[in-house]
Image: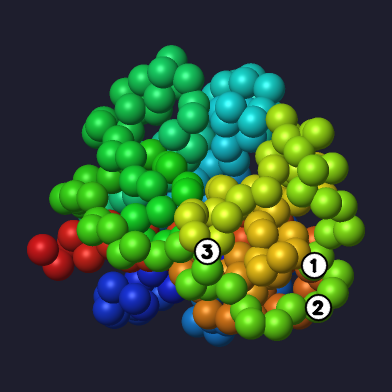
């Protein structure tokens, strides 16, 4: 991904001697390199064959085949089966600590398979506790972890005061309501949490959802999406808005990962 785990390690004040990333998406790699010069990029995770020192292994296989939003092909799906690469690498490297993340909307059957392979029960953490985004995820980890306290952050707290006209939609709330069965057309209040960011999605709300700001309706900007994931403003800059949304939608929430990692010190 875009190396949000590095951001989390920094937030948790964990000293980093070396950090190796496996990623094939050129835009994610570009974002990672822009923000973190220390990272060594290796490309396809399937090419990791050699035992190397590893204190902590952090990853999340694609969720599209597991999520309620996907076709439920499960862990044998073309993308979500990369989970087994995580298991292979965990068994190969035998890290002292590990964190695996995936969607909480998966079937109980898939959750049970992952739990057996990981050897630990997952904890479900909603990023809404530490951010303005509802994002329920399972975390399989051997780091002692409890739920974080609710910080009470809502969408209104992370909005930019002025945004480009391109982020506003021309349709009225009534016109959008006719298609409200699709998340991409629903309008949400800024006094609450945002919907979960996604890498792919249709409708005028696309990957962020739609929000009523004043008397107008708009989607979130890339910077606002970065804030929802606990990233610095312009963290994903340098690529198109489409790719920025995709990178944010595929990312961890850095504050959730940092919260888990702090358990190492405890």
Q: Residues within 10 Å of mark 3 (few under 14, many from 20)?
A: many
Q: Secondary structure at mark 3?
A: helix
Q: CA distance from mark 3 to mark 1?
A: 16 Å
Q: Residues within 10 Å of mark 2 (few under 14, many from 20)?
A: few
Which color scheme does this rendered protein use? rainbow
Tell me whether circle 2 and circle 1 mark residues in contact (CB < 8 Å): yes
Please state the horizontal and vertical placement of residue 172, each as a whole percent of the image.
83, 51
Q: Eyeballing the image, is 238 above or below 82? A: below
Q: Quadrant of the N terminus?
A: bottom right
Name which of mark 3 and mark 1 comes first in the sequence: 3
Name which of mark 3 and mark 2 comes first in the sequence: 3
Please state the horizontal and vertical placement of residue 42, each as a whole percent of the image.
60, 63
Q: Residue furthest top?
A: 109
Please state the horizontal and vertical placement of residue 70, each as a whole percent of the image.
66, 28
Q: Eyeballing the image, is 79 above or below 128? A: above
**Residue shown at 22%/65% (left/top)?**
262
Q: Is residue 21 visible?
A: no
The residue indicated by pointer 2 is 164
Q: Eyeballing the image, is 98 above or below 218? A: above
Disc number for residue 167? 1
Please state the horizontal and vertical placement of residue 150, each as a whole percent of the image.
28, 58
Q: Eyeballing the image, is 182 above or below 149? A: above
Q: CA distance from mark 3 to mark 2?
A: 18 Å
Q: Secondary structure at mark 2?
A: loop
Does 222 sit left or right of 8 as displayed?
right
Q: Is residue 186 visible?
A: yes
Disc number for residue 155? 3
- Please tell me in which quadrant of the rendered image residue 37 appears: bottom right
**Residue shown at 44%/73% (left/top)?**
7
**Residue shown at 78%/73% (left/top)?**
239
């Amino acid at each position: 991904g875009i190396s949000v785990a590095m951001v989390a390690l920094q937030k948790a004040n964990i000293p980093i001697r070396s950090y190796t990333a496996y990623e094939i998406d050129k835009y994610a790699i570009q974002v990672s390199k822009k923000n973190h010069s220390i990272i060594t990029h290796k490309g396809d995770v399937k090419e990791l064959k050699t035992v190397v020192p590893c204190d902590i292994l952090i990853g999340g296989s694609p969720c599209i085949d597991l999520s309620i939003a996907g076709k439920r092909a499960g862990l044998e799906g073309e993308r979500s089966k990369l989970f087994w690469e995580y298991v292979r690498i965990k068994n190969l490297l035998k890290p002292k600590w590990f964190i695996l993340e995936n969607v909480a909307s998966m079937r109980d059957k898939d959750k049970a398979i992952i739990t057996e392979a990981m050897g630990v029960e997952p904890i479900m953490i909603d990023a809404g506790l530490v951010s303005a985004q509802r994002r329920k995820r399972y975390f399989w980890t051997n780091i002692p972890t409890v739920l974080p306290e609710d910080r009470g952050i809502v969408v209104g707290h992370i909005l930019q005061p002025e945004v480009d006209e391109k982020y506003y939609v021309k349709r009225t709330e009534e016109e959008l309501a006719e298609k409200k069965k699709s998340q991409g057309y629903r309008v949400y209040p800024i006094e609450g949490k945002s919907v979960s960011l996604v890498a792919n999605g249709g409708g005028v709300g696309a990957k962020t959802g739609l929000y009523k700001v004043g008397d107008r309706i708009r989607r979130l900007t890339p910077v606002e999406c970065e804030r929802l994931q606990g990233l610095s403003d312009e963290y994903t800059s340098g690529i198109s808005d489409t790719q920025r949304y995709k990178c944010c939608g595929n990312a961890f929430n850095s504050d959730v990962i940092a919260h888990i990692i702090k358990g190492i010190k405890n």
